[in-house]
Image: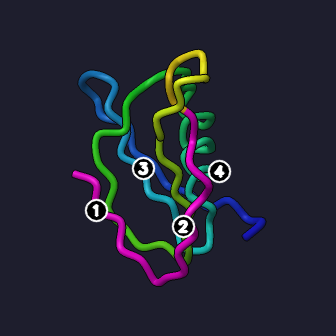
Amino acid sequence: MSQIRTQAVVSEKGRTIVGRILPGTDLIKGIEKVCQDNQVTSGTIVTGIGSLVRAQFIYAVPDKDAKIGIKYSEPIRAEGPLELLAC
């Protein structure tokens, strides 16, 4: 997965960008490339729909010794195909 393939369209009103991360592209690297290509320095991802070959999840767990009261869990890995629906 070394090639980063993306497509994006910028709306004429406001600054909404609709991006597509093409198959075989790492999700995070694809998002970063869409942002770079469109000079995005901060923003919000409103929704995401697609499929993944594999995924890794972490979540916050309470930790009374940590400065902010939480720490991250050990990664949970899942092999796909997986569907991503984040609306």
**Lower position in the chain sequence, tag 4 or tag 3:** 3
Which residue is at a point 60% across and 23% down the rendered structure image? Answer: 65
Residue located beneath label 4 in the image = 29
Q: Earlier in the sequence, mark 3 or mark 1?
A: 3
Percent of width and height locating residue 5: 62, 61
Picture quadrant of residue 74: bottom right
Spatial separation of the CA atoms under disc 3 and disc 1: 15 Å
Q: Which residue lies furthest to the front in this view?
A: 64
Q: Indicate the position of residue 37 as horizontal and vertical percent values.
A: 60, 37
x, y (%) of residue 7? 49, 55
For the residue marked with disc 2, what is the amino acid?
Ala
- Amino acid type of the residue that numbered disc 1 sits on in the rendered structure: Leu
Q: Which residue sits at x=29%, y=48%?
A: 47
Q: Position of 12 compared to 82: left or right?
A: left
Label annotation for residue 85: 1
**1 vs 4, front mark:** 1
Label 4: state its secondary structure.
helix
The answer to if 27 sits in the magenta stretch is no
Disc 1 versus disc 2: distance between alpha carbons? Answer: 13 Å
**Which residue is at the far right?**
2
* Residues at circles 4 and 2 in contact by the CB criterion of under 8 Å: no
Compared to residue 77, the image places residue 15 above or below, namely above
Q: Pointer 2: what residue?
A: 55
